[in-house]
Image: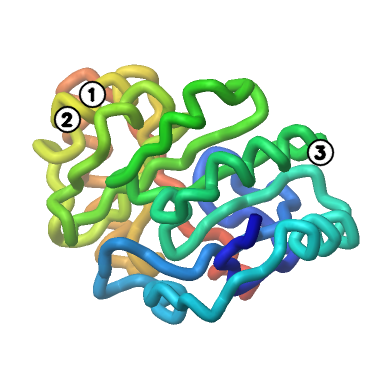
């Protein structure tokens, strides 16, 4: 197995419900969509010349020595080897978190031990927040980037509603900008009026100057 991975390094999870956790970040190179505000644009292009053997990746992860692995991108689900890679990591004793835009699914995840992987779903405006229906069942958190495009109607779409009702909704102000923080607060108030709940969680790693 070879992996199109452009970065592996230890850091702290700066987003979502697992914020503050010590992690090893594994960044896949290549994304199937383009978001204008993406903060890792260098990871968007697919690069055929970037292929790292699984053994080399596992050696690097072992040398770092952190149990929590964060797989991000790019878009991890755009890579057919993702499911098999996660299976290997679980077998090696790791807990695996995957960040995804939710447009693609791999049936392999329906057979993996549910307690050993965690899916952070972050739908994108650039594709009208479309997701594969499977994520309504398998996502552990629904992380919505708050900018001028996000509305209560989007948050309460039928595909998101099961996650919202389970209090899995996170509002993440784009760029930690003041105007987007205010939008997030307004969205929370509107959701509360409608009987729903959300949390505002900024990008902590940017606040404390971590990659």
Residue 165 appears in which quarter of the rendering? top left
Q: Which mark is residue 156?
A: 2
**From this viewpoint, is residue 6 visible?**
yes
Q: Earlier in the sequence, mark 3 or mark 2?
A: 3
Q: Earlier in the sequence, mark 2 or mark 1?
A: 2
| Viewer-closest of 58 and 2 | 2
Tell me: 13 left or right of 31: right
- Measure the C-alpha gap from mark 2 to mark 1: 5 Å
Q: Residues within 10 Å of mark 1 (few under 14, many from 20)?
A: some
Q: Residues within 10 Å of mark 2 (few under 14, many from 20)?
A: some
The residue tagged 1 is 161
Q: Which mark is residue 59?
A: none
Q: Position of residue 34 (x, y in %)?
A: 26, 69
Q: Residues within 10 Å of mark 3 (few under 14, many from 20)?
A: few
Q: Position of residue 175 (x, y in %)?
A: 38, 69
The residue tagged 3 is 92
| Label 3 with label 2: CB-CB less than 8 Å | no
- Element under label 1? helix
Answer above or below: position of 35 versus 110.
below
| Label 2 with label 1: CB-CB less than 8 Å | yes
- Seen at 72% across and 35% down, the residue is 90
Q: Position of residue 79 (x, y in %)?
A: 46, 55
- Element under label 2? loop
Tell me: 143 left or right of 64: left
Residue 187 appears in which quarter of the rendering? top left
- Seen at 82% across and 63% down, the residue is 60
Q: In this rendering, which labeled residue sits more in front, label 3 or label 2?
A: 3
Q: Quarter of the image for the N terminus: give it.
A: bottom right
Residue 87 appears in which quarter of the rendering? top right
Q: Earlier in the sequence, mark 1 or mark 3?
A: 3
- Measure the C-alpha gap from mark 3 to mark 2: 38 Å
- Measure the C-alpha gap from mark 1 to mark 3: 35 Å
């Amino acid at each position: 197995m070879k992996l199109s991975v452009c970065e592996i390094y230890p850091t702290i999870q700066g987003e979502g419900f697992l914020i503050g956790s010590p992690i090893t970040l594994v960044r896949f190179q290549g994304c199937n969509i383009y978001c204008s505000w993406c903060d890792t644009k260098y990871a968007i292009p697919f690069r055929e010349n970037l292929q790292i053997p699984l053994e080399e990746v596992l050696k690097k992860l072992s040398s770092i020595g952190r149990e929590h692995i964060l797989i991000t991108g790019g878009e991890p689900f755009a890579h057919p080897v993702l499911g098999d890679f996660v299976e290997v990591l679980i077998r090696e004793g790791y807990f695996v978190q995957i960040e995804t835009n939710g447009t693609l699914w791999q049936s392999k995840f329906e057979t993996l031990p549910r307690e050993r992987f965690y899916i952070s779903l972050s739908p994108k405006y650039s594709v009208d927040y479309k997701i594969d229906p499977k994520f309504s069942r398998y996502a552990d958190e629904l992380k919505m980037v708050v900018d001028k495009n996000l509305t209560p109607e989007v948050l309460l779409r039928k595909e998101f509603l099961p996650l919202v009702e389970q209090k899995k909704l996170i509002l993440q102000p784009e760029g930690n900008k003041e105007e987007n923080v205010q939008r997030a607060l307004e969205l929370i108030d509107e959701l509360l009026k409608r009987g729903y709940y959300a949390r505002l969680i900024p990008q902590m790693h940017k606040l404390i100057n971590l990659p």
